[in-house]
Image (spheres, helix red, strand yellow):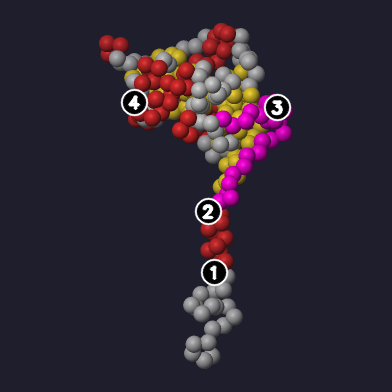
Amino acid sequence: MMEGVTTNEQDSRGEPWWLPLRRALGHVRRCVELDTYDVFARGVEPAHRDFQAPAGYRFAWGTAQDVAGCDEHHTELDARERALGSARLDLGHRVVIGFQRGPQERDTAVFSMWVNPRHLNVPGHVKRALQPDQVFIYKAYTSPEHRGRKLYEAGMRFVLADLAARGGRELIGYAHVKKDVSRRGLAALGFAPRGRFWRLKTPLGSTCRVSRELAALFPRAVARSRALDGNPGVLAAGEPA
């Protein structure tokens, strides 16, 4: 073969003709994201009234003062999230806080989980109306030093106890298909899958689809509202979260 002449297998730079196409396809794959989530439900039973916190901890419904005093390391609530958390409370959401008992009643918040009484609301994904006897849990977080002590399960049992006392029927949660820790916690408390939703994100925009089962159980889709500063659970005044 004469020097300087390329074959059909190579371009002028000496690389295979298909390599640029492979790079382009790889770029497309990196720009396209598909997330899959399952929605779970746990029916409320009379036995749920009996709640006991793990030894060394106490659980309570948090106040705005409690939220303001949360440490970012232990609860993932930075200054912005603490301010927005107070706004969530004003809109009727509730927050479960797990405290590690300390000396002289100086307890430290080491777990937090939010409760939406109106909507199954995963911002940017899905928003469906709940029944009056259902609530939806979201944004659960356990301090790194306190993981493995079943605080997530205790937080959900705390909410179930409250529902049982108030005549509630069902607790709704969700988890990404790859979020093993969350899914194990839900399974441990007997949550059952109730449907699935998907979010496809491309350079041209994003779209969300729900399964037929999920749409049948939560038939009323709710229009997305203007989130305050783009925050998941906090909306402008007068808008239901």
Q: Which residue is mark 2?
A: 30
The boundaries of the magenta stretch are 202-225
Crowd around label 3: few <14 · some 14–19 · many ≥20 (10 Å): few
Q: Residue at x 68, y 26 (%)?
A: 220
CA distance for labels 4 and 2: 35 Å
Give the amino acid type for the residue marked by disc 3 in the picture: Pro
Secondary structure of residue under mark 3: loop
Sequence-wise, the earlier of marks 4 and 2 is 2
Instruction: From the top left corner, tell me how far across and down residue 130 is, in percent.
Output: 63, 21
The answer to whether residue 21 shows anywhere in this view is yes
Amino acid identity at mark 4: Asp
Q: Which residue is mark 1?
A: 19
Choose mark 1 or mark 3, whichever is in front. 3
In the rendered image, is residue 39 in sight? no
**Marked residue nearer the N-terminal end (1 or 4):** 1
The amino acid on which the numbered mark 1 sits, given as a three-letter code, is Leu
